[in-house]
Amino acid sequence: MERNELYPIFLKLQNLSTLIVGGGNVGLEKLSFLLKSSPNANVEVVAPRFLPELETLAASHSSVKLTYKKFNRWMLRKRHMVIACTDDLKVNKRIYDLCRKRFLICNIADTPPLCDYYLGGIVTKGNVKIAISTNGKSPTTAKRLREFFEEVIPDDINKMVENLNEYRKTLKGNFEEKVQKMNEITEALKIPSARKGEREKDK
């Protein structure tokens, strides 16, 4: 059975420099996706022309810069991650090759073999964020899972997280003791089958 070996991380995009190459529908989709989750993301979008909707979106985010030029390799300087979504496959492949030489992580839209990372489904409820990946196999499945989790996760979960954070600050003892106490107080959050499985292991 094939296994998803991707490693999920949560990036502070306001502290990084992201380049998007492409100003069409896919470029709009990628920028919208980034800003929905990270509204202060530091992003530069490069293209000779931009969709009016993309220009409007960029205008509402001061951390987004539009550059009305064709891609040039010098645009990769001081970047951390790159997304290429032009309508020219040769340009996209060139960007990917240049990124590999510079040790930059790159995503070539709709081309899984040329992706170091994927933009998966994301569920956000206050401080709680869940990322969903299908290993690039089925974005539609990721979308449906996102809708499912948005429905079943209560809106007040953020209040619980904040309360637990305040409680954690009051705990005494070493790290191991604090973890044990937090595990005890959050035991009720486990689904019944998980709790039963742990009890059987302890026998």
Image (cartoon, helix red, strand yellow):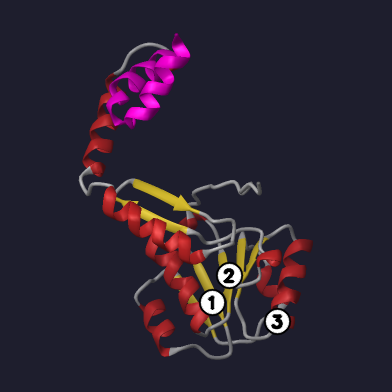
Per the image, the residue denoted by label 3 is 89
Among the two numbered marks 2 and 3 on one chain, the one whose residue lies closer to the N terminus: 2
Q: Indicate whether 189 appears above or below 37.
A: above
- Is 19 positioned to the left or the right of 152 in the image? right
Q: Residue furthest top?
A: 203
Across and down, in percent, residue 21 comes to 60, 77
Per the image, the residue denoted by label 2 is 19
Q: Which residues are magenta?
A: 176-203
* Badge 1 density bin: few <14, some 14–19, many ≥20, Cα 10 Å: many
Per the image, the residue denoted by label 1 is 45
Residue under the point 23% across and 36% down: 160
Among the two numbered marks 2 and 1 on one chain, the one whose residue lies closer to the N terminus: 2
- Is 37 positioned to the left or the right of 24 in the image? left
The type of residue carrying mark 3 is: Leu
Q: Is residue 178 magenta?
A: yes
Q: Quadrant of residue 71?
A: bottom right
The type of residue carrying mark 1 is: Val
Residue 39 visible from this viewpoint: no
Q: Are marks 2 and 1 in contact (CB under 8 Å)?
A: yes
Residue under the point 49% across and 57% down: 13
Q: Indicate whether 160 appears above or below 131.
A: above
